Image: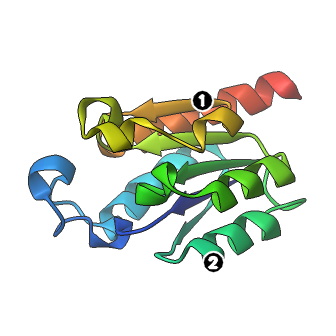
Amino acid sequence: MKILIINGANMNMLGVREPEKYGYLTMKDLEKELYSMSFSMGIDIEMYQSNLEGEIVEKIHKALNIFDGIIINAGAYTHTSIAIRDAIEAVNIPTVEVHMTNIFAREDFRKISFISPVAIGQIAGFGFDSYKLGLQALINYLKKSD
């Protein structure tokens, strides 16, 4: 089983950006935790981060016939990018949307997700654990679909 984990705009600033919301751990710390988890579960993951919408769209397109599932935290693109939404729909790879913060407890504009209608589910508000919960949920979903 092979899972692509995509991080969007500003996620490379973890540990620096608004630590009261996102904590002091970095993207490298997140990668270490997720690679360790995937190793113990016997699955392959690939981590990807870009601040550029078009690069994220290209990465999703290239995932076709390579990855069994996608976990995406598109950052602010969650609330603005129809292109990322359409890319997820086009490749038809089971996708879980994750967010470190509870987007429904934040500004009104963050309560709208263009991704959730094409995702199999959304997990938000648990920091790094949102990714772990999303990964476990996606694996469970894929095993049931076999």
Q: Is there a contact, CB below 8 Å, between mark 2 and mark 1?
A: no
Q: Position of residue 108 (x, y in %)?
A: 31, 37
Determine crowd level at label 1: few under 14, some 14-19, many 20+ residues with C-alpha closer than 10 A: some
Q: Position of residue 100 (x, y in %)?
A: 33, 44
Tell me which residue sits at (30%, 34%) in the image.
102
Way the structure is coloured: rainbow
Q: Which mark is residue 21?
A: none
Q: Position of residue 14 (x, y in %)?
A: 26, 65
Q: Is residue 73 above or below residue 112?
A: below
Q: Nearer the viewer, residue 34 or 55?
A: 55
Q: Nearer the viewer, residue 89 or 100?
A: 89
Q: Is residue 79 visible?
A: yes
Extreme residue in the top direction: 144
Q: Which mark is residue 55?
A: 2
Q: Is residue 1 visible?
A: no
Q: Amino acid at mark 2?
A: Glu
Q: Is residue 25 left or right of residue 123?
A: left
Q: Is residue 18 above or below residue 1?
A: below
Q: Is residue 68 left or right of residue 76?
A: right
Q: Is residue 76 left or right of residue 20?
A: right
Q: Is residue 6 above or below residue 144?
A: below
Tell me which residue sits at (52%, 77%) in the image.
52
C-alpha span from label 2 to label 1: 23 Å
Extreme residue in the left direction: 20
Q: Amino acid at mark 1?
A: Gly
Q: Which residue corresponds to mark 1? A: 121
Q: Nearer the viewer, residue 120 or 25?
A: 120
User: Disc 2 or 1, which lies upstream in sequence?
Assistant: 2
